[in-house]
Image: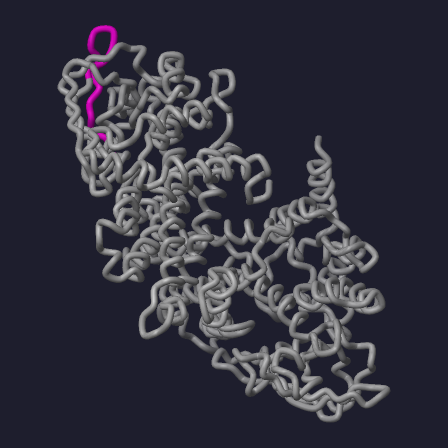
Amino acid sequence: MPLYLTDDQAMLRDTARELMAEEGAISKQLRKYRDMNCKDGFGHALWRQFGELGFTGVLIDEADGGLGLGHVEAGIVLEEIGRNLTPSPFLVTAVAVVEALRGAAQRERWLPGILAGETVAALAVDEGRKHRPESIAMKAERSGNGFKLSGQKRFVVQGASADVFVVAARAEEGLTLFTVEKEAAGLDVEGVRLADSSIGARMDFRGVEVDADAVLGEVGGGEAVLGRVLNAARAGAASEMVGVGSGAMAMTVDYLKQRKQFGKLIGEFQVLQHRSAHLYSELEIARASALKAQQLLDEGSPDAEAMVSVAKAKAGRVSTLAVQEGVQMHGGIGMTDEYDIGLYMKRDRVLNELFGDSNYHADKLARLKGY
Amino acid sequence: MSDLETFRAETRAWLEANCPAEMREPVRDEGDACWGGRNFQFKNEAQKLWLERMAARGWTVPDWPVEYGGGGLSPAETKVLRQELARSGARNPLYSFGISMLGPALLKYGTEEQKKRFLPEIARGEIRWCQGYSEPNAGSDLASLQTKCEDKGDHWLVNGQKVWTSYADQADWIFCLVRTDFRAPKHKGISFLLFDMASEGVSTKPILLISGYSPFCETFFDDVKVPKDQIVGELNKGWDVAKYLLGHEREMISGMGLGGGSAVSLGEALGDVLAEDALLRAEVAQFDVDAVAFKAMSERFIDELKAGQAHPAQPSMMKYAGTELNKRRHELVMAAGGSSALEWESERSRGGKTAKEWLRTKANSIEGGTSEVQLGIIAKRILELPGA
């Protein structure tokens, strides 16, 4: 399979690009919901529109009413979300949670709402300040016909508006994933506004009772499911960061062609040309690595996991380079809230932390390669 | 089974049956590779056999047309062949500037006669080519070259000097940029000329480099007579051919970023030393992220190129990224090797191979257009920045 988009995928990209540039624009989404201090931090109307267009079902099997497409297609949508900094549950709901529900009995309960763009679903994995899924401590103790969950979760993106959570906890048999509804007794969800004005959540589970049928997959079999979910989510986050970096670069290169100092367009200065060209080169490489990771995921290749870590690490570094160069090359105006380039910097920071930062994934690659 | 899968199965079986065992060992260095040419001494029978067998199928140039010695394969089949060659560990049967640089330029700009005359012997490895581009006063500013080519009625007369001519002392023929109009603006008085290095008046002198190797020569032309039909493209329009060929050269050099076919994971190759050095391990891990990502980029670039989707200036980006990566790789190899990597002559060090290769890589970001030249091209042609 060639490492570029097929004709169908290119068509989807064009559709997504047009839609997001129009409906997902910073003024219509990010700034609007930020400035109205929206407790959800995103627009439900656009989420429903995603449902009408089928985007929410990109990764849902056709038998379940979805489009039955793959991670490449999810990445296409996410790159456009990133380019416009569009706040959306797409990554956590339509990618991460949908992957968790794949083949699970609970999909009949949750997929219709997700497909319609009505339901928001979130992934609760992190517990400390960094992403460390290897050391999840939340307890799942046998209780009656089900389990009792105790512990804390943090950095649950879209957690404040989620109807349902996929929660990773440790049972006696090993790591296990559960679906937990927002109304569950003993569950506290504190919405937390983050630097990019998205809303994450801190969650407190005080002996939350769930039935046995809340278990996703096998009891003790959470490691494999979570691995699959995180691969999907990380590859998606890599694409979103490629979008963030590309959006920041486009704004910056545009600015270099307009701003005059010393009687010249600043884009004529070789020092800025070379830095921009280096950034372009890095972004192209990051985009290729994300696409490769998604193709391998779609093929079910055993090499996918390493490539996903490469993509998340690479896209993270490159997106950070793009937003830093962006603010610096804009000069003073880049520091103002009125100008959008600073918003890219904030979004990049959040996406870098999400699902493991570049150091985490470089280390993971090294371990997978045996050093 | 799809046609492509059938092709894959047949190719795999053919390689299994026809690639000699010795030719499945990695190439150790440039001297161990097969370069072909009139005076080439095959290292062993297997090397000769492997070249002949691949050339007979047109697989030294799988995507060239059959009538010019190629395999006539589609881009998809070429990719499958490349994957199967890599899978079987088979060596490249022929390293050749004729294949990687001149061939594509002849296919695009050559006359039918020139294609029929030169391409099949390139495909079979019978003629070894070198490239006469740089001059003492025309480096990054290549178009200011001064080698003079005069029309003497029934022949061209060439006088001047080239420098950094790779393997000129071992080459049979040269593709050379010469000035045919001294009054025109510098890009518009250049022609692209082919001639035999055995012609009277051609001499070469190897240049000793910091690595201790002499892969480059100074090349002198003193009243060299060249037949009139050996200009490629139109008179005074050689710069177009030159730029097109440079794209292919950059593509080839960018492949160095892949570590010359060795294990893509540097950390895996370095092994134990990293366990005792946390900072080096971290640096190597970051390098491996970049290296694997670049490998994906190379795959994407080649696929897009074959599909006609690549930006024409994209080879500059590949050359820049690939060579900078290769330099980083060798810095890390030296750091991991410590004082062992410093030995310059000992048998233990195979004659200072690690150190010499490290120094060799420093030319990567200079030859074929410096990194700074590539960044300038990206800024101008891709980002369309002003005044670049």
- State how many labels appear: 0
The vertical placement of B225 against A247, above or below, is below
Of B131 and A344, nearer the camera is: A344
Residue drawn at the location 51% of the way across and 57% of the way down: B258
Of A64 and B323, nearer the camera is: A64
In the image: residue A311, left or right of residue B296? left
The vertical placement of B362 against A286, above or below, is below
To which quarter of the image does residue B101 belong?
A: bottom right
To which quarter of the image does residue A326 belong?
A: bottom left
Of B268 and A222, nearer the camera is: A222
Q: Residue A138: within the magenta?
A: yes
Which residue is situated farthest in the bottom direction here? Answer: B222
In the image: residue B354, left or right of residue A181? right
In the image: residue B225, left or right of residue B101? right
Region of the chain picked out in magenta, as a range = A135-148
To which quarter of the image does residue B133 belong?
A: bottom right
Q: Is residue B347 visible?
A: no
Q: Position of residue B14 (x, y in %)?
A: 74, 45
Q: Is residue B226 visible?
A: yes
Q: Position of residue B217 (x, y in %)?
A: 61, 83
Q: Position of residue B57 (x, y in %)?
A: 79, 53
In the image: residue B139, left or right of residue B79? left
Q: Position of residue B36 (x, y in %)?
A: 73, 69
In the picture, which quadrant includes the N terminus of chain A?
top right
